[in-house]
Image (tube, rainbow, N blue to C red):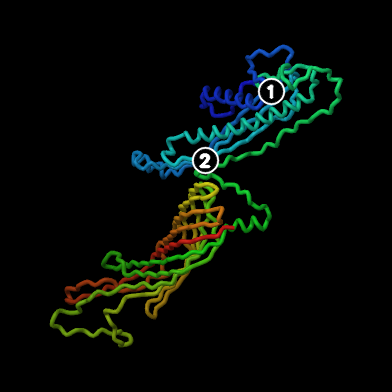
Amino acid sequence: MVEPLDLQADPAVEIGARHALDDGFRSYLESSAQWGAVLSREDPVPAGALVYTVTPRVSQRHSVSRTYVLDVLLVMTMGLVPFGLSWGEVEVEVSIAIRRADESPIADPLRSDIQAPHSTVVYGAFRADEIEAAFRKAYGRAFADTSRALVAAIEVELANTPPSIPMVIGEALLAATSSTSSIAVTSSAAVPRALAVFTPPPAVRVYLEPNEFDVLTRPLAHQDDDDALLARYVGALGGVEMAAFRGGAQVESRTFTVNGPDEVVGSGRAETTGYRFSFFRPPDRTGFFFPPSIGLLWQDITITGFRDAIPLARTGDIPAVPSDPKTGVGVDLGAPLSYDLRLRSGYLGQGIGLNLVAGTDDVQLFFTLQGHVNLVEIRYVGVTVGVNEVEGTQAVGFRSAGFELQGGLVFPGAHLALRGLLQSESFFEFDFPQPVEFQAGTRFNPDKEVFERQRAFVRGASLWTYNAQVSISYLF
């Protein structure tokens, strides 16, 4: 006899859903026990039947993760941008206790713990159909596993029961009647036999992998996985990546003057291209992650500006011959305006990232968006202007940040991966140890009737770095 199913779930689960689970469980039992009958508590028990009571208990849970940024965008655009990614897992635990007529258990409770993924890409914040589909899949597997184990337990029990007794398995589950062909009405003393022992299968949590192209919430299992220490160590490295990259840095300085606002006095750019080999492991599951940000910046760059043409006197006047007052050496007032920077930074920070991985055993598509803020930096700055040089070291906080965007394809069977990567970091205002005197823009002096270049001072420089690469990897 099968007692009503005890569902440990959210009270919001409708009564109709609970009855549907009851009916589904009974259907699995009926299909598994072809030799018996499934009875509920209200059904009459045949006279002389041996009754077993089956008490099923079910617990269900589910998790949902969202980007929230896409959800806000979806609401702000009134659904015109339909992307609202959500993902997670459902879990169903089924426990079945089997008791004899004297209330003694015939074995330890049978248990099944099934997990299944769910994901939604379009309007994910407003849809629950994929969650319901995952629950149906998990319940189907849990009921099928426990039904088979229950039938095996009953069959062992019947093998240990004197065959002269007609039997029914039942208060809510299974009943075997005297008409069953496997029951012989003979004396139990006629054939001595050894008792069989039923051992319940171990309660192992089972994860149901998607059987089609879908968002992956955990890594797919592979038949060729090796548990050896060396294999796991090498596998953790991912694979060997060969990349072609192009990167650069741009730096900019602003100046302040006594008589005018701040202005940009110069900027510099450095670029680099090349190839490199490294280890790379592609992401294998969808979800947020929180990596630390640890790194070292080492950048030498020249900031260059150009003086504008400056009329030194009114037309008709004798032109001046400029020279350095200390040395008497002539000075070209139209020469480029430049200085050299040496910027170093060792930093420690915290990042947040989101992986989106979808695919099958044959091919997987991945995207990653990651950002970080550097909490603490130790900075060194060296500035050379002509023969003058200043340098210094200081500790700063929350003065730099960066982001990274990558996407690619993984072909597990071929052990290959393709990837594109964009990275950028901004270092806000490398303060100079002391203001560096500079020559700013020109102003007309009406008293002298000449254009004069103002004295100005530069306090620091800001730096922006970037890198782009494409790569191919051989995965271990």
- Picture quarter containing residue 200? top right
Quarter the C terminus occupies: bottom right
Q: Secondary structure at mark 2?
A: strand
- Dot 1 crowding, Cα within 10 Å, few <14, some 14–19, many 20+: some
Closer-to-camera residue (211/300): 211
The percent coordinates of residue 268 (x first, y second) are: 36, 70
Q: Residue at left 51%, top 39%?
A: 118
Between the residue at mark 2 and the residue at mark 1, the CA separation in whole angstroms equals 40 Å
Tag nearer the camera, 2 or 1: 1
Query: Do we see residue 186 in this rendering?
Result: yes
Query: Do we see residue 400 in this rendering?
Result: no
The percent coordinates of residue 288 (x first, y second) are: 50, 48
The percent coordinates of residue 90 (x first, y second) are: 55, 36
Q: Secondary structure at mark 1?
A: loop
Closer-to-camera residue (392/332): 332
Query: Farthest residue toward the bottom?
Result: 328
The percent coordinates of residue 185 (x first, y second) are: 79, 17
Q: Is residue 313 above or below residue 131?
A: below
Query: Mark 1 — residue?
Result: 35
Query: Mark 2 — residue?
Result: 88
